[in-house]
Image (cartoon, rainbow, N blue to C red):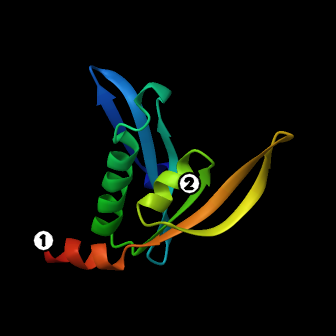
Amino acid sequence: MIIEETSSFVAVENNVIIGFANLIPRGEGGGELDLLHVSPDHHRMGVGKALVTVVEERACADSMFQLWADASLLAAPLLESLGYEVVERYVKSVNNVTFQNTWLLKVLSDQFTSAQKR
């Protein structure tokens, strides 16, 4: 079951959740950075970057060499600044509501090699 395989990470400040992200294994050395969210009051304070970093570290520790992300318009620029490459920009529809999303990919092979040396 996918829930059993998912790793969740939570950012907390003063006993209040200010952000979270998931890592979902997708097989064959790949994973997905999923549900990255940071409280609006904590945008542009390094919380998103810290969450992405811990997800990438776990992915490397779990022998994943690439991460996919299906990102919103808010999250895509952060991921691009952290080395993720745009694969496709598209319009997503959920319950008859449409919005723009972006598929991004980051190859972690260099990070994976560094993590294995530790």
Q: Residues within 10 Å of mark 2 (few under 14, many from 20)?
A: many
Q: Would residue 98 appear left or right of 9 to someone viewing this image? A: right
Q: What is the secondary structure assignment of the residue under circle 2?
A: helix
Q: Answer yes or no: is residue 2 visible.
A: no
Q: Is 65 in front, or is 39?
A: 39
Q: Are marks 1 and 2 in contact (CB under 8 Å)?
A: no
- How far across and down, in percent of the image, does residue 36 sit? 49, 45
Q: Residues within 10 Å of mark 1 (few under 14, many from 20)?
A: few
Q: Would residue 56 appear left or right of 68 to someone viewing this image? A: left
Q: Would residue 77 appear left or right of 112 to someone viewing this image? A: right
- How far across and down, in percent of the image, does residue 64 sit? 39, 72
The three-letter code of the residue at mark 1 reads Arg
Q: Residue at x 46, y 29 (%)?
A: 39
The three-letter code of the residue at mark 2 reads Ala
Front position among marks 1 and 2 = 2
Quadrant (top left/top right/bottom left/bottom right) for the C terminus: bottom left
Question: Which residue in the rendered view is the most extreme toward the left?
Answer: 118
Q: What is the secondary structure assignment of the residue under circle 1?
A: loop
Q: Which residue is mark 1?
A: 118
Q: Would residue 93 appear left or right of 107 to someone viewing this image? A: right
Q: Is 15 in front, or is 8?
A: 15
Quadrant (top left/top right/bottom left/bottom right) for the N terminus: bottom right
Total of numbered circles in the picture?
Answer: 2
Question: Which residue in the rendered view is the most extreme toward the right?
Answer: 96
Name which quarter of the figure residue 109 lies in: bottom left
Is 19 above or below relative to 102? above
Q: Which residue is mark 2?
A: 76
Q: Residue at x 31, y 53 (%)?
A: 54
- How far across and down, in percent of the image, does residue 83 sit? 43, 66
Give the Cα separation between the discs numbered 1 and 2.
30 Å
